[in-house]
Amino acid sequence: NIVRNVLYPISSSSSDADLKGGVEKSINFLLLCAMPIAVGMIVVAPNIVAFLYRRPEFSHTIPALQFLAPSVVFFYVNMALSILLVTKRQDKKIPIIAGIALVFTLVLDLLLIPLYQHIGAALVTSLTEALLFCLNITFIPRGLRPLGSLRVAVKALLASLVMALAILPLHTFSILVIL
């Protein structure tokens, strides 16, 4: 909701350059928030599960949380990209995107859930969000694609990996200490 509230006034701009700049800034901010969250979820998943459930029989949920973490990044960015599609009156393409994602998800669910149960479902969720990202980028007019955000994504990923390295020695502590 916050993303929508911020992007809709920007999207009312008449200039494509202003719109692209506003969307890139929004995506950059979302990447700076989402990357550390996702990487942190992967690294501290055991601590999160231990804090929430305090029982060893829930340890099987750790890989599911780790496989689900990348979907956070794609979900955040997809929100901004879908607003851009609506703004540029490309909203007729949203059902096409949704249909492709539906078939993709259904096929992968049928293949991966019987083999990997909850971990397969988490993986499918992340892969579906990645697919939605690719489709959104494909359907956005070329001149409005936020390519400048690629550098920010790489920098945010590198910073998040450094954060992960700093967190690793603290893996025996509570999630509250790590945070």
Image (spheres, rainbow, N blue to C red):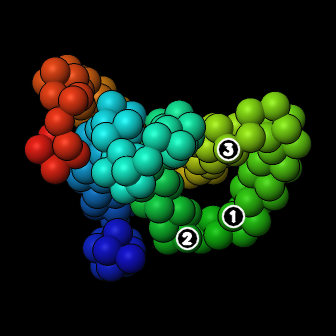
Q: Is residue 168 above or below residue 81?
A: above
Q: Dot 1 corresponds to which residue?
A: 94
Query: Residue 110 in the image: x percent, y percent?
Result: 88, 42
Q: Quadrant of residue 138?
A: top right
Q: Residue 153 or 53: which is nearer the viewer?
A: 53
Q: Quadrant of residue 171?
A: top left
Q: Which mark is residue 118?
A: 3
N-term mark: 1 or 3: 1
Q: What is the three-letter code of the residue carrying label 1? A: Ile
Label 3 crowding class (10 Å Cα cut-off): few <14, some 14-19, many 20+?
some
Q: Callout 2: helix, strand or loop?
A: helix
Q: Is residue 98 above or below residue 141?
A: below
Q: What is the three-letter code of the residue carrying label 2? A: Val
Left or right: 144 in relation to 93: left
Q: Which mark is residue 129?
A: none
**Circles 1 and 3: CB atoms closer than 8 Å:** no
Q: What distance separates the C-alpha of mark 1 from that of mark 3?
A: 28 Å
Q: Callout 3: helix, strand or loop?
A: helix
Left or right: 111 in relation to 13: right
- The reply to whether residue 105 is in sight is yes
Q: What is the three-letter code of the residue carrying label 3? A: His
Query: Residue 102 in the image: x percent, y percent?
Result: 80, 55
**Circles 1 and 2: CB atoms closer than 8 Å:** yes
Label 2 crowding class (10 Å Cα cut-off): few <14, some 14-19, many 20+?
some
Q: Dot 2 corresponds to which residue?
A: 86
N-term mark: 1 or 2: 2
- The reply to whether residue 65 is in sight is no
Q: Quadrant of residue 123?
A: top right
